[in-house]
Image (tube, helix red, strand yellow):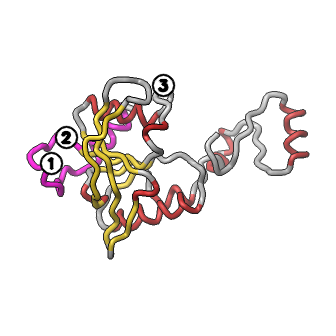
Amino acid sequence: VVARLALLAASIELERTDPDMQGESNIMELAFFADPPGEFKVEKDSTFAMMAEAAKRGHRIAVFEQGDFALDRDEVTVRASRIELTGQEDTGWFRILETRNRRLESFDAVIVRKDPPFDVEYVNSTYFLELAEKKGARVFNRPEAIRSHNEKLTIAQFPEFMVPTLVTSDESRLRAFHQEQHDVILKPLNAMG
């Protein structure tokens, strides 16, 4: 997490477009596109860990969800909530300071942390992100890459690193693979798990 934040900070040219951030050149405003924060399992959630590390370093945190996107003429906006972390590690881990509509390019970085399912709404979100990227938003991970690379199939591009793997919806093949391998992990292809 620390290395990711350091790389992120190094790759961002600190050019302020939000007047509230003028004169605070060492502080970044990070927007996390994520699941509803109230549903985070903070004891194991890597998005929470990234937010906590960013907050520890003094950066400002905003969050938004899939339903918060809008295309207003040619501007992609989101209804983003600026939050502060409370230090608690339960459902009260954050407090909303303010919620307002913002252009995505007004943030120093937009960090895509939305968990699957990889459904039509998720794909549409990547289109919004891609449009915002063309307007100057700094989006991590790139929307086109998210659409083009299924996280569970990408390993097939590196067969030398693969353990015995079977991707199928054929139950008889799954049973035969389990019989052969004994200890297997089953995961849905386009959902979290």
Identify the magenta region.
Answer: 2-28
Asked whether 4 falls inside the magenta stretch, the response is: yes
Q: Position of residue 40 (x, y in %)?
A: 48, 35
Could you give the CA–CA distance between mark 3 and mark 1, rounded to whole angstroms?
31 Å
Q: Quadrant of the N terminus?
A: top left
| The disc label shown at residue 43, or none | 3
Circle 1 is placed at which residue position?
21
Amino acid at circle 3: Glu
**Who's the residue at 47% across and 45% down the image?**
35
Q: Do the residues labelled 2 and 1 touch (CB within 8 Å)?
A: yes
Q: Residues within 10 Å of mark 1 (few under 14, many from 20)?
A: some
Q: Where is residue 183 in the image (x, y as percent from the top left)?
A: 79, 28
Foreground mark, 2 or 3?
A: 3
Residue type pointed to by label 2: Ile
Point out the image quarter for the C terminus. top right
Residue 120 marker:
none
